[in-house]
Amino acid sequence: MAEIINIPVILATARKGRSSEKAANFMLEQAKAYGLETELIDVRDYRIEATDNSGNLPEAQRLSSKISRADGLIIVSPEYNHGYPGELKMMLDMLYEEYFKKPVGFCGVSSGIFGGVRGVEQLRQVSIEFHMVPIREAMYFPQIDSLIKDDGRVTDKDYHDRAKKFLDELVWYAKALKQHRD
Amino acid sequence: MAEIINIPVILATARKGRSSEKAANFMLEQAKAYGLETELIDVRDYRIEATDNSGNLPEAQRLSSKISRADGLIIVSPEYNHGYPGELKMMLDMLYEEYFKKPVGFCGVSSGIFGGVRGVEQLRQVSIEFHMVPIREAMYFPQIDSLIKDDGRVTDKDYHDRAKKFLDELVWYAKALKQHRD
Amino acid sequence: MAEIINIPVILATARKGRSSEKAANFMLEQAKAYGLETELIDVRDYRIEATDNSGNLPEAQRLSSKISRADGLIIVSPEYNHGYPGELKMMLDMLYEEYFKKPVGFCGVSSGIFGGVRGVEQLRQVSIEFHMVPIREAMYFPQIDSLIKDDGRVTDKDYHDRAKKFLDELVWYAKALKQHRD
Amino acid sequence: MAEIINIPVILATARKGRSSEKAANFMLEQAKAYGLETELIDVRDYRIEATDNSGNLPEAQRLSSKISRADGLIIVSPEYNHGYPGELKMMLDMLYEEYFKKPVGFCGVSSGIFGGVRGVEQLRQVSIEFHMVPIREAMYFPQIDSLIKDDGRVTDKDYHDRAKKFLDELVWYAKALKQHRD
């Protein structure tokens, strides 16, 4: 029987009119097609008033149950002023040990031409402090509104192959680390 | 008549029990003693639900009026998981042009021994995108709870001299840029 | 009489077959056309065997005389594995006070699509430690070999306007800081 | 029979009078005591004139044979102006595929109080592009000349325990990834 690998997709912005939702939905579909157990974790469902790493908030407990089960993470994040969205950071900072020894793959999104690469570089540094493995493969979605249409159609056909390559690496690490954790 | 230089102190975390408040109060006192026009901008007063750079939120308008008047900024920020607090980023991302061509000095705070230097490095990158001038001098407050007592007493006497050096540089830039903007 | 502003262009790689040379030459021409006093500082002329910040090396003394006279710097650098070229870092690390309170503008170069933005982000952090002002405007030269032909022709006409905007900001800071240093 | 794990220690600076050599020797001893197969890779033995990733240089070939055999790396690096030593970057950039899917642990060294943490953050970003796994545990050697005496004696007794914890994590990843690569 094939091993079940659970890798949720985190949508990292709660901004009104967020275009990253299209990229997150694309990645969610690709993860399903790849055979992963997955779901969308929407930062809108985990909004809190202030950084809180006590673990006591109901939002923290809901998130903890999802991340604890996960074998890895996909984070789809826009770049705001060369950094990451505040709401993502507040959500991630609620937990700690739940992340340990799990791989994370980043997908950057931008309206400009660089696809959010700078925000991803900062998030990789944060993920290391969470004892995660930030994989090298990444998906970048520059000029998101022409790249993914409102009906979800991706106009660059390469993106399906890229997603495959990205998931290959992410799953390779998910399996390697899961096996060794057990 | 002496020129009035306005440099507010931003307290970058809304976390319950935040120790950075002690460092922010120390910097506020030092700025006053230096002769600056200053005040505390507490991120707790600018909490929003999601990143919003439309400029329409009342929080954005309140912040805009303060930053527009400022000649520079002091940001006192803890480091959370090698990054910056989410609530700070959401607050900063509300504005853009208000920051242009103004210097910013960072004060890192941590319970550990490195004083939040890594969070500061990430914030410096963000501040450049705001067209600000991130100055080289910085104040670091490691092991904050023994460094600053609950009554506000700073146990390391060097910190007054360091604050002086930090403010010297910050004010140098504030004056140079203000003069050239005019 | 117009003020003379001296801003050399640093070519940051000594790699055989370096394509960044084309971008450096383009920036040099733009700087001249803008009316700046400028020249190429080629890292090939400042190669040393090991990091040395003693100031004693003849290479350090030659570089010192150029940087001391400069009112700002343009650094044209490829990105190698998300970082900066080692030979650039060794050259820059030879000096320290010569950089103080001068603006620096970065030009990233890459064969891929992101134009070296990640290398630039790291260099900005380094430049702050040199007490420099890393300006927000930057020039990025992605897919350099189709962007600039071997005869020096730039195939994207926007690059002249972008260079103008870049130099406007760089010179604004060069003048503001020079005036205030005096 | 116990599995042999090969993890060399890279000494990242060729600077005359380098204090990092003391930290590298300490880590080499700890790695041996831990039961690893290890050796010192001294950047002084891999000095080249310019970045070269052709793989043709004799230095590249010598390094390639060592890194190919390695199951992971320890990099002991000082921080110069908030970045990494140029000679380290030139050495690392000679190779690429040899690094794939191997863990790397960083040891920062400084004469100041922050132990080179900023240089390590930048190196972690570079290591991801090498498809390496930058582990969370790190060793920092602040105020190196009082921390490690010239005869090699470490004055803070905690460092042996810290090295143990660091090696535990590094070896955990070395084994997990080696097993899954095979």
Image: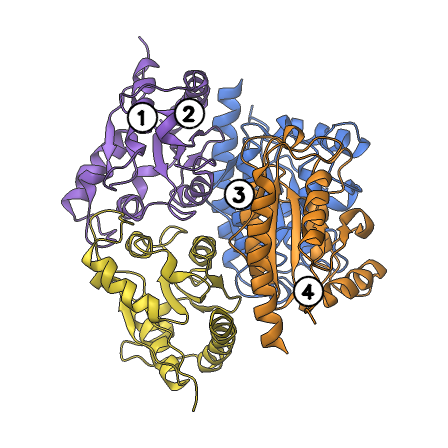
Chain colours: A orange, B blue, C purple, D yellow
How many angstroms separate mark 2 from mark 4 (CA)? Answer: 51 Å
Q: Which mark is residue C7?
A: 1
Q: Is residue B9 left or right of residue B157?
A: right
Which is more toward the observer, C109 or A141?
Answer: A141
Closer to the observer: label 4 or label 1?
A: 4
Element at label 3: helix
Q: Is residue D70 left or right of residue A30?
A: left
The answer to whether dots 3 and 2 both sit on one chain is: no
- In this orientation, does residue D48 appear? yes
| Image quadrant occupied by the N terminus of chain A | bottom right
Please name the residue that numbered disc 4 is placed on.
A5
Which is more toward the observer, C76 or A50?
Answer: C76
Element at label 1: loop
- Among numbered discs 1 and 2, the one appearing first in the sequence: 1
The answer to whether dots 2 and 4 both sit on one chain is: no
Q: Residue furthest left?
A: C58
Closer to the observer: label 2 or label 4?
A: 4
Q: Amino acid at mark 1?
A: Ile
Q: Which picture quadrant has residue C64? A: top left
How many angstroms separate mark 3 from mark 2 (CA)? Answer: 18 Å
Q: Amino acid at mark 2?
A: Leu
Please name the residue that numbered disc 3 is placed on.
B124
Q: Position of residue A139 (x, y in %)?
A: 58, 45
Q: Residue furthest top?
A: C1
